[in-house]
Image (tube, grey):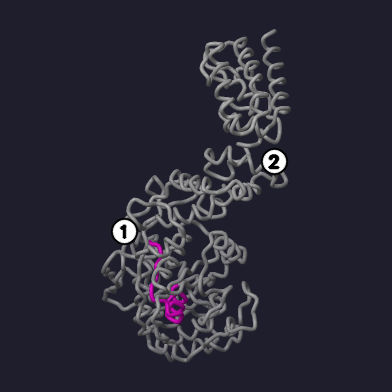
Amino acid sequence: MALFENSSYFAYHPKYYTPTTDSHCTLNISPVLRYPYPMEIRNRYAPSPTGLQHIGGVRTALFNYLFAKSQGGSFILRIEDTDQTRSEPVFIQNLFDTFQWLGFHWDEGPDVGGSYAPYIQSERVVLYQKAAQELLDKDKAYHCFCSTGRLENLRKERESAHSSETGYDRFCRNISKDIAGSRVKNGEAYVIRLKIPLGQSTHFHDHLLGDIQWKNEDVNPDPVLLKSDGFPTYHLANVVDDHLMGVTHVLRAQEWLPSAPLHTIIYESFGWEPPKFCHLPMVMGNDGKKLSKRHGATSIDEFRRQGYLPEALLNYIALLGASYEEGRDVYTLEELAALFNIDKLNKAPAVFDYKKLDWFNGLYIRAKSNEELSELALPYCKGLIKENTALFIDAMALIRERVSLLSEIPSKIAYLFEDPPLPEPSEFFPRKASLAKTVELLELGRSLISIVCKKSDEEAEASFKEESAKAAASVGVKLGDLMMPLRVAITGARVSPPLLGSLRLLGEEKALARVKKCLSLLKAALCK
């Protein structure tokens, strides 16, 4: 089958996008695949929709966004879905949801359109086929008719011989164009492979790593550009799209560095000028290995479920491998865009520190008003309350200094909305106190409740300090020992939000009822 005889190759691919009446869906197919670079900086985030958005991908997107904005340029989203067996619409929706939550967006992309639409690779197949044909015409590529069986046998033979050779053996490289053309016309299945120049080296410059030379013998031998189904491989589609979309700078993770010599060869085969490369430092766990699930959450969905705020997560991610102002850690997205400098990227891998992220998140939580924090916390508290009540809003003041994640809030405030389970008697005991002494202290603490609950906020705090100090002195114990039985009775725990605030929010009637139940428990234990 000839390359352009199957009309399905020209078909619009609406797998992920519903066409509109604007120019977004127009395939701009030109016989000359050379577009001048725009004067502005243009970069892109080009994920494959084969999984959830994760920390590494978002860091790449964020750095591209910040670089474009710092230079007054354009940030592009392109979805690279040429791996049709693994690409799923659910992952594209996750992509959109993630960046909507994080709060930064692209200037051009599948959902907003742009001058270089479409921005989904499965909708651009004709362009890649024309590009592959151009390389065939230039003798920079060739038809390969090797079957899957032959390639598998080649692999097994090498394994048996313990050969160090890998990749394709260039079996079809020297088939003449006439013979190849006849075999294509006869309907023989084929792929199109790139002719890697032999006996040479490829040079390219990386903004972060400097000048790099790569022997061509170490490049994947004559990789496939166009598969037998007419779809491109990642390498061809990536290069063609970056060129046609006028991408001036490619910022991507260092794990893509081995692809750079191959991409450079493809650019040279077309006679195109490559974009400027900058391979970003890896994001590692504390053990020095690439960040993965074994270190904790890596998908943005998981961070979101745990109760991280988008602005805290963005702020922290922006610091992974980049520096801004000395002695400063906290920035808004606008400040990051104004201060981002590609020359301040680090060569060394960045270490993802979950404790530092928690610190950032706690900082942003404490900056919220009670009303703002209650709105953010409400989805995590659905099993506790159904609506944002005045009590729920006021409770935020008690716990904002004591939580790092929104998901921690329900357990911190549950005692205000439902009676906690009765603890074991030993939980009430202050240090070295007997059961009898604990009963005495709790009865003394009960006498403070009415004093606290019947006064104004200003009066209550002063009265509570004064009266509790007197009570502790009257029985010869420290203030903390006096408060321990009362704290456990009211909150159900030895460590809790501030007791004074808890008593005032709970109210005199409920507070006294809880103390009464706990005294009954302790006295029953005393009688045994």
Q: Nearer the viewer, residue 91 or 302?
A: 302
Mark 2 lies on residue: 384
In the image, is residue 522 above or below residue 395? above
Question: Which quadrant of the structure image shows residue 67?
Answer: bottom left
Tell me which label, 1 or 2, sits earlier in the chain.
1
Residue 71, x across and y down, in percent = 39, 72
Residue 3, x across and y down, in percent = 52, 86
**Is label 2 in a helix, a strand or a loop?**
loop
Q: Residues within 10 Å of mark 1 (few under 14, many from 20)?
A: some
Q: Nearer the viewer, residue 92 or 171?
A: 92
For the magenta stretch, what is the residue range? 235-254
Q: Give how far apart the Cα atoms at labels 1 and 2 are.
A: 48 Å
Point 54% across, 52% down: residue: 309
Residue type at mark 1? Lys
**Is label 1 in a helix, a strand or a loop?**
loop
Q: Is residue 241 magenta?
A: yes
Residue type at mark 2? Leu
Q: Is residue 463 left or right of residue 138?
A: right
Residue 152, x across and y down, in percent = 47, 67
In the image, is residue 49 above or below residue 480? below
Q: Residues within 10 Å of mark 2 (few under 14, many from 20)?
A: some
Mark 1 lies on residue: 347
Question: Which quadrant of the structure image shows residue 221?
Answer: bottom left
Point 59% across, 86% down: residue: 6
